[in-house]
């Protein structure tokens, strides 16, 4: 019988090394290991635990640690331990049992498939429970996976596709500064393709390049074991040399721009908490670009950059334009970005423009064409968020474009339509109680009557007072609901499942399950096989102002397509209009036909 998940402790000293050499798998077997004291942790993988331990004992930083836990398993191979190392680094960094993870890298640089990977991933959950039992971890994997620091961690390993784009962008950036020119990267990718994770990984590499261990980059280094592919290794070495020689060891001045305040505040908090060279001040809004001199600006969700139309406040927009020498009536926020850094990295999806103030695709292209910069274009195609994969995302887009003529079963995904809206909402609330990050979102088909003049000190107290007074915003089939009380962090609040969210509270976030209510403003015409919009039932006055019907229809369809793609494990749907409900039932399994998964 092979050894299964035996976690064996050795003192981290010469005596412990002597004992390890006597273990039957201590010299020539693939293992993962954790070296630690009460506050610091180092995680690694090796095919010879004794050799690797002797090397670590000679390291000035690590030799102060007290113990080493080695995971012996008779089923392990090199692919497994590379995968486990990366996952342990990522989970332990968020878990918080140890104050500091002292790894200089994040494990293998790109996720790769291997034989029986899903089975080994299942065994990793068993291993993690054993780590908790041995007081080497404290939180369950489910708790960790719902944490924003986990989702936006610099310790995320990239896919092969993301890794290739990362290498290319870093090389493009170095070229820009070596040539003394300006450069632009434009990364296209639909919802869930990992644009934010890629941006954070590149930023982390740029900030920490000078501190990368030379042994990780030198293929000739003795006992080299880190799985960095040749392109990545050469690029990181080139980056480190450039910063060392051309910048005197000084890191790039980087800004990470988010047009939407909700996701911006979330990522800012992540940067403050995760450390590793990332600081909250890097995460900024579009108007902040004039406050500092930036070498590089990364712009997430750049399809949400605005023009001077239907804005809440025009003074800030005009002041920023003038600060950059631009005409407020001619310029837009993409102009601000292009004017404010030597190199710009834009992450873009034209199908996610949802407001009339957002730049249209034509306006976006025309703005870029004004600048005589070298533009390198890349595309992310692999679906990272949704367990239904690329199949589900394409299916949803086809349904919303009226291009499907028959239902398709989506594997590994709960795509269900409900006849009763309150059953949908209660099902999502139950999911939220079980696993978190499950919310219901609706189209803007109801006025926001309960919106307070200023943010209440206690959201739940304010919500309860509204309910007690019989106040509400949304009425469907006699059921009454209240719009989200806050935009910031609504998605991650435990109490937010009492309210109904909108596109502005959800874009950029992942949900485990998404509930989607199609409002009264969108319907289906069976004679023309097309979606139709009733502007009298659309209540977002800022979006409607001075916007033609065709553009509004496109924005509304984009809104629903975007929120349908938010769920990781599933999406529950209801439509207020009977024709829309009937149309969607042609392509979505009815709740009466299926048993809801736990």
Image (cartoon, grey):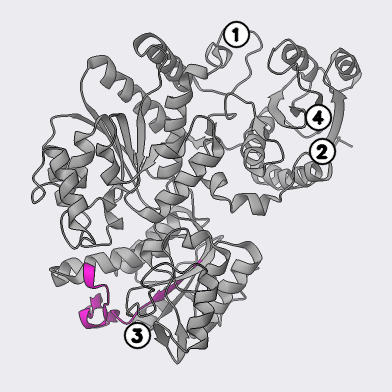
In this picture, is 312 found above or below 595?
above
CB under 8 Å between discs 3 and 4: no
On screen, residue 112 versus residue 350, left or right, reads right
Q: Mark 1 and mark 3: span between their CA atoms?
A: 66 Å
CB under 8 Å between discs 1 and 3: no
Closer-to-camera residue (162/360): 360
Q: Earlier in the sequence, mark 1 or mark 4?
A: 4
Residue drawn at 46 percent across, 41 percent down:
197
Q: Which residue is mark 4?
A: 69
Q: Which residue is mark 1?
A: 221
Q: Report the span colored magenta.
A: 514-542
Within-10-Å neighbours for mark 2: few <14, some 14–19, many 20+: some
* Residue 193 on the magenta span: no
Q: Earlier in the sequence, mark 3 or mark 2?
A: 2
Residue 395 horizontal/vertical position (percent): 39, 62
On screen, residue 410 versus residue 322, left or right, reads right
Q: Which residue is mark 2?
A: 5
Q: Mark 1 and mark 2: span between their CA atoms?
A: 31 Å
**Residue 577 bears which disc, if any?**
3
């Amino acid at each position: 019988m092979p050894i299964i998940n035996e976690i064996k402790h050795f003192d981290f000293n010469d005596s412990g090394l002597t004992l390890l050499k006597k273990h039957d798998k201590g010299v020539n077997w693939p293992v993962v290991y954790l070296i630690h004291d009460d506050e610091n942790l180092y995680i690694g993988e090796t095919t010879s635990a004794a050799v690797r331990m002797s090397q670590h004992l000679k390291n000035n930083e690590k030799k102060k640690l007290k113990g080493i836990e080695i995971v012996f398993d008779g089923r392990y191979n090199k692919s497994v331990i590379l995968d486990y190392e990366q996952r342990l680094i990522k989970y332990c960094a968020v878990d918080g049992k140890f104050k500091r993870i002292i790894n200089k890298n994040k494990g293998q640089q790109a996720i790769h498939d291997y034989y029986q990977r899903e089975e080994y991933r299942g065994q990793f959950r068993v291993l993690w429970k054993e780590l908790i039992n041995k007081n080497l971890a404290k939180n369950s994997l489910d708790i960790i996976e719902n944490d924003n620091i986990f989702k936006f961690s610099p310790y995320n390993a990239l896919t092969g596709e993301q890794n290739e784009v990362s290498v290319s962008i870093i090389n493009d950036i170095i070229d820009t500064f070596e040539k003394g020119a300006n450069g632009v990267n434009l990364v296209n990718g639909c919802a869930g393709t990992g644009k934010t994770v890629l941006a954070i990984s590149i930023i982390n590499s740029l900030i920490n390049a000078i501190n990368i261990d030379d042994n990780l980059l030198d293929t000739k280094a003795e006992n080299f074991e880190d799985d960095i592919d040749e392109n990545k290794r050469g690029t990181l070495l080139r980056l480190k040399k450039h910063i060392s020689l051309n910048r005197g060891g000084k890191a790039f001045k980087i800004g990470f721009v988010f047009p939407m305040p909700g996701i911006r505040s979330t990522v800012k908090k992540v940067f403050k908490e995760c450390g590793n060279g990332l600081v909250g001040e890097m995460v900024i809004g579009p108007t902040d670009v004039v406050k500092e001199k930036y070498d590089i600006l990364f712009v997430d969700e750049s399809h949400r950059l605005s023009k001077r139309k239907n804005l809440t406040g025009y003074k800030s927009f005009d002041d920023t334009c003038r600060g950059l020498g631009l005409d407020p009536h001619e310029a837009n926020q993409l102009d601000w970005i292009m004017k404010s850094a030597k190199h710009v990295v834009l992450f873009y999806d034209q199908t996610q423009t949802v407001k009339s103030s957002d730049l249209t695709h034509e306006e976006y292209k025309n703005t870029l064409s004004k600048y005589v910069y070298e533009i390198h274009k890349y595309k992310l195609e692999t679906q990272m968020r949704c367990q239904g994969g690329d199949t589900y995302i394409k299916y949803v887009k086809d349904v919303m474009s009226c291009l499907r003529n028959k239902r398709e079963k989506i594997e590994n995904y709960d795509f269900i339509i409900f006849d009763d809206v309150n059953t949908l909402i209660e099902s999502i609330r139950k999911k939220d109680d079980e696993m978190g990050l499950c919310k219901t979102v609706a189209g803007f088909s109801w006025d926001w009557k309960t919106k307070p003049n200023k943010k209440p000190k206690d959201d739940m107290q304010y919500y309860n007072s509204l309910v007690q007074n019989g106040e509400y915003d949304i009425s469907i089939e006699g059921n009454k609901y209240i719009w989200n009380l806050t935009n910031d962090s609504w998605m991650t609040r435990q109490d937010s499942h009492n309210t109904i969210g909108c596109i502005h509270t959800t874009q950029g976030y992942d949900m485990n399950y998404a509930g989607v209510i199609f409002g009264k403003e969108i319907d289906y015409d069976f004679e023309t096989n097309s979606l139709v919009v009733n502007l009298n039932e659309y209540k977002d006055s800022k979006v409607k102002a001075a916007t033609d019907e065709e553009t509004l229809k496109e924005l509304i369809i984009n809104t629903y397509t975007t929120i349908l793609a938010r769920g990781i494990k599933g999406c529950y749907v209801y439509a207020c209009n009977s024709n829309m409900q009937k149309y969607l039932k042609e392509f979505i399994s009815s709740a009466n036909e299926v048993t809801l998964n736990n």
